[in-house]
Structures are given as C-alpha cells and as structure tokens.
C-alpha cells in the first residue's frame, strides 16, 4: 500500500492570499519534473517483485527538504526565505513511495538576516504545521505509529526536523518548547560551531560542549532523535558516547570513497554509531557523493556509498536520507559556492536517478531489487531501521 498515494489538489498556503498575506516569488510548478526521470530498469519478474515490495514495505527517508524553493536563488532567495513560509510540494510527494519523511526546515529568516535564530524557527515551524493542518494527504508524524497509519491510508507522514542547533543558543529548555510545538529531531550543528558542538568546517575540532551534553540529555529525556549530520568528527563521537539513546546520521557519504570530502564520514564513526544501535542515512545530494569507480554523482555512485556503509555495519544500521529538494538543487548549490573550486570530479546538473524525493524513493527500491537484495534486507534499509530508531527514541 506504499504506491498510489492520495492527492486531492491542495497547494501550499492556498488558504491565504498571495500578494496580501505574503509576497509570492516564482516557484517550480512541478518540483519533481524539473529534470527528466531515469527509472531504473527491471525485467518482468523484477517488476512484479517491485510492485509487491512497494506495496508492502514501510519506506522512510531520514532527511529530505519536501518543499519547493525558487530555482533562481540569487534573485528570489532573500524574499522567499525572509517570509518564513516554505511551500511543501504535496503533489510531488504523492508521486513518491515514501511512507515517512523527515522533513527539514530551518531555512527561513523572517526576523534575522542571518537566520537560525529561535524566533525564525518558531515562525517557520508554525507556518509549516498550520499549512499541513489545512490538507488531507500528509500526516504530521509525532510517533512511529503515524508512519504505519500513513502506509495503510496511502499517505505520507512528515516528521519535522531541523538541520542546525544554533537556535538553542544557551537555552537547553528550548528543546522542550520545540518538542511541544511538534519538532521530533534535530541536527546539533550545521558546518560551523555553536554553543552545542563543533561543525565540520571548523579548523579546530572542539567536540561536544558541556551545554551540548545537557542538550543531548534533554533530547533523550523528552524523546527527540539526535542527529549528528554536519557535526565534526569529535562531536559525532562525543554525541554517540553521551546519548543514552541511539542517534542518527541523517545524511552522509563514506569518507573512505572520497577522502578529500570534509562532508563525508570516516569508517570508525560509522562503527561507533552502529555499536550503539544508531542509523546511518546515505545522501544523494548532487555533486557530493562520488568515488574513483563512479566519478559522476548519480545513482550508481550513491549506491556504492550505501554498499560501503552496509558492508561495514550490516543491515540493521543503514538507511537512506537523500537530502533532496523540489528545485534545481545543483543551481542552488552553485549560488552558495558548492562544491567549490577544489572539486576534482565531474560537475553534474542533477543526480540522475535520485534527483528528488519522488524519483529517489522509487529508484532506491528498484536498484536493490535489480541487485538481488533479499526482501528482509530491503525492508530494513528502506524503512525498518528508521522505524526501530523512532520507536526507541520516541517511545
């Protein structure tokens, strides 16, 4: 029952008036159609198996941006993100086979030019949850059983996720406030350091701070998943040690396959996370995951990273967190300076086969079937492992 998701025609924020309640900016009409789909080929027997597994498998992505962003970020980015409203692409989500998606916000900055302030998060979270309440195709995911319900009802369960802990500042009680407002997971830093821990772009890796330990303890206490994505190596190891619950690495690649990438993760961190029951999500962010064998960022390169992690930690601790956006992701990256002048591999305009959450959900399952993965393994890596983590952390 994972296929044929419901969609009743609702468009984000259609309950308010453009030009009166907010200033509209040009957004893609169909976010999953910006680039051509490349459906992974299967033979007739595999197609039958795909249909059966797509209907029976609980599918969960540990990290997506299920929203429309302007394709022209330099021109329209400030106006769009400065209003606090990010437009979920409900129609494109209905073309996916995800039953659960950790939907990442924290991009808006209605109260600050720099964003990542507490009020900014409250505005964006509030606007997003208000919009979700207006429609009937997406379920707000507050507990693991909401994903099971979404699967049965042919819907998608969206769990609110924040990619950065800057908004905590020095107030660990804000964990409780945001939990009360519907947040169920967040990453402790995004590239740069904050009061909680060091990020991946710092020259000196200070790890988890004493305040950070209090934040992790508070997250464990209220039932919020701790995400280590974008934190530094020492921070990751400190967080794994400090947490009484398993943690996740919502989206990443294997540093063993791309050693020059600071955004990818070393094997010893993967092992430490798996030893405590954590879950590792493999990303498909364009122009991020490549290797010597697959120098072009496409589905084959991404799945090489998946197989590396799986071979290292086994079937029980790996999943997919594709980190897609319903926009021209590579163009957005180019505007922000990613992947940078030191990128040694072929630059691609999109990640063929996994460019958006809709195409990606379908092709992950098809690729695994084409490569003769067992039903048991498929059910674990496509959603079972994340469902287990959700139950352990959320109760």
Image (cartoon, helix red, strand yellow):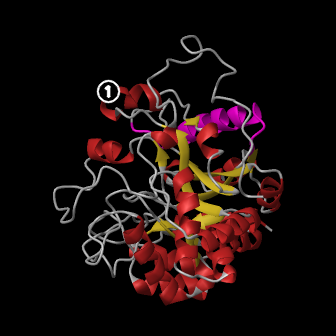
Residue at x-position 47% and y-position 34% = 109
Whether residue 394 is visible, yes or no, is yes
Query: Which SS type dominates the magenta stretch?
Result: helix
Residue at x-position 54% and y-position 68% = 42
Whether residue 214 is visible, yes or no, is no
Where does residue 163 sit, x and y in percent of width and height? 51, 54
- Residue most extreme to the top: 20
114 w.r.t. 195: above or below: above
User: Which residue is nearer to you in this view: 383 or 192?
Assistant: 383
Secondary structure under badge 1? helix
* Left or right: 63, with 232 as reference point: right
User: Which residue is nearer to you in this view: 248 or 181?
Assistant: 248
* Image quadrant containing the N terminus: bottom right
Q: Quadrant of residue 121?
A: top right
Residue at x-position 52% and y-position 70% = 367
109 w.r.t. 292: above or below: above
Total labels: the figure holds 1
Part of the protein shown in magenta: 114-138
User: Which residue is nearer to you in this view: 62 or 207?
Assistant: 62
Residue at x-position 66% and y-position 35% = 126
Residue named by callout 1: 75
User: Which residue is nearer to you in this view: 212 or 78?
Assistant: 78
Where does residue 197 sit, x and y in percent of width and height? 45, 65
């Amino acid at each position: 029952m994972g296929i044929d998701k419901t969609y009743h025609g609702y468009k984000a924020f259609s309950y308010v008036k453009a030009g009166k309640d907010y200033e509209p900016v040009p957004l893609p009409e169909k976010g999953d159609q910006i680039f051509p789909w490349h459906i992974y080929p299967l033979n007739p027997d595999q197609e039958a198996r795909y249909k059966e597994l797509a209907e029976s498998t609980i599918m969960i992505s540990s990290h997506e941006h299920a929203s429309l962003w302007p394709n022209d970020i330099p021109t329209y980015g400030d106006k769009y993100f400065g209003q606090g409203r990010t437009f979920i692409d409900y129609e494109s989500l209905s073309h996916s086979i995800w039953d659960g998606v950790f939907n990442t916000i924290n991009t808006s900055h209605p109260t600050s030019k720099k964003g990542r302030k507490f009020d900014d998060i409250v505005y964006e979270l509030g606007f997003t949850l208000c919009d979700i309440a207006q429609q009937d195709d997406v379920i707000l995911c507050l507990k693991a059983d909401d994903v099971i319900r979404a699967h049965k009802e042919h819907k998608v369960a969206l769990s609110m996720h924040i990619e950065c802990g800057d908004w905590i500042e020095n107030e660990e009680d804000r964990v409780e406030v945001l939990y009360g407002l519907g947040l169920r997971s967040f990453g402790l830093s995004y590239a740069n350091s904050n009061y909680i821990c060091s990020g991946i772009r710092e020259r000196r890796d200070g790890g988890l701070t004493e305040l950070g330990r209090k934040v992790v303890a508070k997250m464990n206490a209220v039932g919020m998943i701790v995400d280590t994505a974008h934190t530094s190596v020492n921070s990751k190891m400190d967080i794994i040690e400090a947490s009484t619950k398993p943690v996740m690495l919502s989206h990443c690649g294997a540093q063993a396959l791309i050693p020059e990438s600071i955004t990818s993760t070393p094997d010893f961190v993967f092992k430490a996370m798996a030893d405590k029951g954590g879950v590792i999500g493999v990303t498909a962010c364009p122009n991020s995951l490549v290797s010597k064998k697959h120098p072009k960022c496409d589905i084959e390169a991404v799945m090489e990273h998946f197989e590396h992690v799986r071979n290292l930690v086994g079937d029980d601790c790996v999943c997919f967190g594709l980190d897609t956006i319903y926009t021209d992701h590579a163009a957005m990256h180019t505007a922000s300076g990613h992947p940078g002048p030191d990128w040694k591999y072929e630059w691609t305009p999109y990640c063929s086969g996994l460019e958006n959450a809709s195409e990606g959900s379908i092709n992950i399952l098809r690729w695994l079937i084409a490569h003769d993965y067992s039903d048991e393994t498929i059910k674990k890596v496509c959603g079972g492992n994340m469902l287990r983590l959700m139950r352990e952390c959320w109760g």
